[in-house]
Structures are given as C-alpha cells and as structure tokens.
Image (spheres, rainbow, N blue to C red):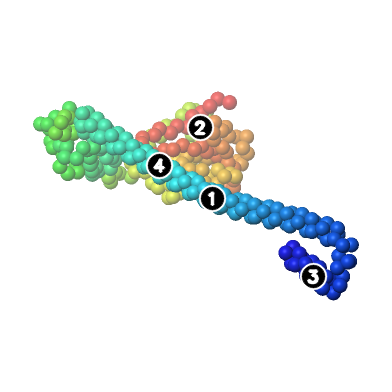
Amino acid sequence: MVTKIIIYLLIGIIVGSTLGFGGGYGIYSPQISNLSKKLNTTETKYAELLSSNQLLLNQKDELQIRYTNATNLVADLQNQLNDKDTQIINLQNKINQYINEQNILQSKILDLENKLQVILEGPELTIYPDNGTYPQPLEITMKSSIDGSMLYYTLDGSEPSTSSKKYEESIKINDIGEVTIKAIGVSLYRAGSIMTKKYTIVDSNPPLGEVGGLHYVTWNFNKNNFRKLDVTIKIYEEPSLGDGLYFQMYQGMINGVGFYFGFQTDVYKPGVGSAGKGIIFSRWGTNDLSNVRIVDGGWSQSAGYEGDFVGVRVNYVWSTHTYKMSVRYIRP
C-alpha cells in the first residue's frame, strides 16, 4: 500500500512537470517531503505491527502446542490412575481370596482337630429312645460317632466290654419290667465312654383299671369325717395335644356336693382360649367364685352348661409318668 502511494506521488510530479507545473512543485516540495517522512514512519509502524502479529501468532501456536501436551499429559495421568485403581481392586480381590482360603483352611484344621479329639477319646454313642416308660415291645437303636466302630452292650446293668454282646441290629425287648442298657463303642484306636439308658417296659394291653379313666363313687362323704382322697394314676402313652382329651380321674360327692378332677390336653382359659396341658378341679351346686381358692399361676371358671359349677385350673405339662392326685379337707 505504501509503495503504491509513493508511485502515485512520483507519477503526479512527473505529470506536473510535463504539463508545465514545474514552478508549482517548489511550493509543494516541503509538503511532499513531510508526507514522505510520514509514509516512512507508517511503513515502519506497519512493519512493527506485522512483526508483533507474527509474534502473537507464534505464541498462540506455542500455547496450542503446550495445551495439547498438557491435555495429553492429563489423559496419560488419568490412564495411570485407572491402572492403579485396577491394580488396587485386583490386590483387594487377592486379599479377600486369601482370607477365604485361610478361613476354609482354619475350618478344615478345626474339623481335623475335632475328629482327632474324637479318635483320641473314642467313639461317642447315641442310644434311642431316651430314658422313660414305654409299652412293649421296646426297640432300641444305637449309633457311633466314628464309622466302623464296634458297639458292645449289656442289658443287666453290668459294665460292657469287648466280650459283651455285639450290636449288629436294633434290640427288641418284650419283657415287662425295668431294663438298664449299657453300651460302649470301640474304634481302631481306643474305646469310648460307657453310655447308660434306663427303661420301664409296661404291658401294651394293660387292664382298663390301670389305664385310669373314670373312677366314680356313689357314696356321699361326710364333711366332718372327710380328710383326704388320694388317687394314683399312670399314663403309659402320651396323646397328641390336638386330641383335646380330658382324663377324668375321679368323680364323687362330699356332703351332697358333686366334684371331679383330672388332666386335660388343652385347658380352656377365659379371655385366652386354648392354654395347653393342665389340671382341673370342678364342683357343682354353685357358680359363686368365692368358693374357690386359686393357686399361683392358676385361674378360676364358673358356668352353667353342666349345671351350676365353679372350677380351678392350672397349666401343668404332664407326660408319660405316674401321678398322685389328692383331694384334701382344708380347715377354713
């Protein structure tokens, strides 16, 4: 641009001279000189601006390169962090696996220690059924804690040994009476402790009077002479709780007042309903609850569906056993 201006000025001067304006050139010569200087200054500044612009462009390119390098560095660092996270997760998994293996190993060691203890102590026996009273025939089974053990037993209460009868199948006992079985297990290493069970074998078809049931008296006890009435009962086989049975063990009269007592498989409790096994005692002729005395944990009941009566009840978990029930006169 500056070069074009200078050429235009030179052309103007030449044209002026040619057209006869030479004398006028002297007048404009100072102005042209000033303009020429200004043009030189402008050219210098323009060159400086071009240089500055190029410097800024270079700086921009340098910054762009640095930004790109920094972005690549951040991405590289992020990748390194991700790699470290993956390494940490893998290490934690290995630690957890090691802990699980340690727990499994510890469990195996404990199991081996228990087995070793059993071997050192000898077989431990399990005899079924447990102590108690059972109807004939009674079948007894035994089991050892160590496979392959030899089991020996006696039925007369004597101490068992390897010379005693060997257990090979379940033992059946038909004789009525008391039986004490003692058994011992012997492994390849040593004998275990002696296990003892005691049974009472009873007739599986006893006479009706021995079962219990209803005992009824028709005479009238005189209150002045009555002191107590004891009834002994024996339960041979326990019914299920769902049977809803009442074993009335005695029914009679004292001075014209009827009464009865016995066991129930499911005693009724007012406001509750079924309360489970228990004992009951009832008397007729009144529904006044002031005529009853309640034991700790018991309750009373009065009704009229069997005629007026009052009764006392209490939960009692009875089972196969011999019981003695007693009615006694208590001085008021």
Question: Is residue 109 rendered to the left or right of residue 161?
Answer: right
Q: Is residue 66 visible?
A: yes
- Compared with 68, 264 (above or below) is above
- For residue 91, the mark is 4
In front: mark 2 or mark 3?
3
Q: Residue furthest left?
A: 163
Question: Is residue 19 rendered to the left or right of residue 246?
Answer: right
Mark 3 nearby-residue class (10 Å; few <14, some 14–19, many ≥20): few
Q: Residue furthest bottom?
A: 19
Amino acid under disc 4: Leu
Mark 1 nearby-residue class (10 Å; few <14, some 14–19, many ≥20): few
Instruction: Report, in whole angstroms, how far the alpha carbon at label 2 lies from the one at label 3.
Output: 173 Å
Where residue 213 appears, as percent x and y from the top left, is: 39, 44
Residue sitting at x 70%, y 53%: 48
Instruction: Report, in whole angstroms, how far the alpha carbon at label 3 lies from the one at label 4.
Output: 92 Å
Amino acid under disc 1: Asn
Amino acid under disc 2: Asn
Residue sitting at x 79%, y 56%: 37
CB under 8 Å between discs 2 and 3: no
Residue that numbered label 1 is attached to: 69
- Compared with 254, 332 (above or below) is above
In front: mark 2 or mark 1?
1
In front: mark 3 or mark 1?
3
Pick whichever, 284 or 36, lies toward us.
36
- For residue 222, the mark is 2
Where residue 325 appears, as percent x and y from the top left, is: 43, 33
- For residue 269, the mark is none
Where residue 177 appears, as percent x and y from the top left, is: 24, 35
Dot 1 or dot 4, earlier in sequence: 1
In front: mark 2 or mark 4?
4
